[in-house]
Amino acid sequence: MISTGPDIHTYAGNGYIYVIREQKVLVDLKGDELAIPFKDAAAGLDLYDSDGYHIGMLDSRTCDAYPVPAAAEPPRGMGFMGLRRLFGILDPEKYSMAVRAMGILNWDRTCRFCSACGSKLKRLPAIFAKQCESCGFTMFPKISPAVIVAVEKADTILLARANRFAENLYSVLAGFAEPGESLEDTVRREIKEEVGIEVKDVRYFGSQPWPYPDSLMIGFTASWSSGEITVDNDEITDARWFTVEGLPLIPDKISIARSLIDSFVEKIGRR
Ligand SMILES: [Zn+2]
């Protein structure tokens, strides 16, 4: 684990501050390691107290999240960096807190009026929720569950290309849960819709919050049961069974998609 080490800003009661500017996090670049700055270091930025959130504790310090306008300049020796660049560099707990900060501020920014009557919302104290000033309807941070699935057939894994992917990139299939479905139902429906095959042995793998803007990716493994791959050509442009030796370009380490593929590769290696 990376230590932030002694710092001139360190004193009792000075917590971490997660300053978010357009999906990027303010980091202190002055030491040997990247660090999340302490609260007093954010002086000079356009922070508005009413827009900040207390989001948790780390190392017995408070963690607060604040949005700043797109034009806000970082203090000297600091910079704004995206989560992708910070993954594997920032200490995992501080990274997770950055994901949380981004998710909560995304919600705060996009949830401004009552979805029942359209009136203004006010923030409730102590919990992440807003209440309508007119009809009393309470709105909580929205989390959109999506399944992401590694389907295996013998020594091969199903990978597909979506039309939004970078060139030559293939990944496991994913899709959002719909009302009334169990996550296992979602897995079977998405795979059937996107590539026309039936799967069995649907098993939970792990999950990952993905704050773009509010997804929770829930990973599963499954086995091919029947059917031939038929690509819908709408969302998916190509899908194939790949061997470990013949893997195409796959997503980078930050994603649960990659964890699913890496896990398959390890499993084949043990056979
Ligand atoms: Zn209302």
Image (spheres, grey):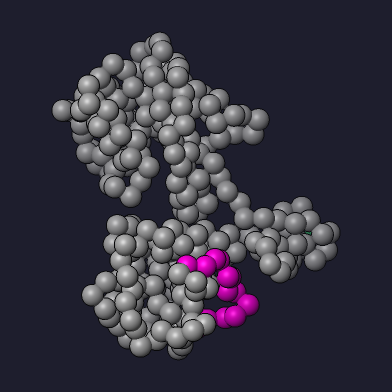
Image coordinates of residue 1 in percent, x first then y, are: 31, 62
Q: Residue at x 55, y 31 (%)?
A: 183
Q: Could you tell me residue 64's position as x and y percent?
A: 53, 72
- Residue stretch in magenta: 45-58
**Quarter where residue 72 is shown:** bottom left
Residue 34 shows in the view: yes
Give the quadrant of residue 25.
bottom left
Quadrant occupied by the C terminus: top left
| Residue 84 position in % (x across, y down) | 33, 57
Above-or-below relation of 236 to 153: below
Relative to 255, is 53 above or below?
below
Residue 36, position in %: x, y? 39, 72
**Between 171 and 92, the one nearer to me in the picture:** 92
Towards the viewer: 269 or 100: 269
Is 207 or 181 nearer to us in this picture?
A: 207
Position of 122 relative to 253 (above/below): below
Residue at 44% x, 39% y: name it.
206
Residue 169 visible? The answer is no
Outermost residue to the top: 226
Name the one closer to the observer, 204 or 150. Answer: 204
Q: Residue at x 29, y 47 (%)?
A: 253
In the image, residue 235 sits, relative to residue 84, either above or below, namely above
User: In the figure, is residue 271 to the left or right of 182?
Assistant: left
Residue 23 lies in the magenta stretch: no
- Point 33% across, 74% down: residue: 4
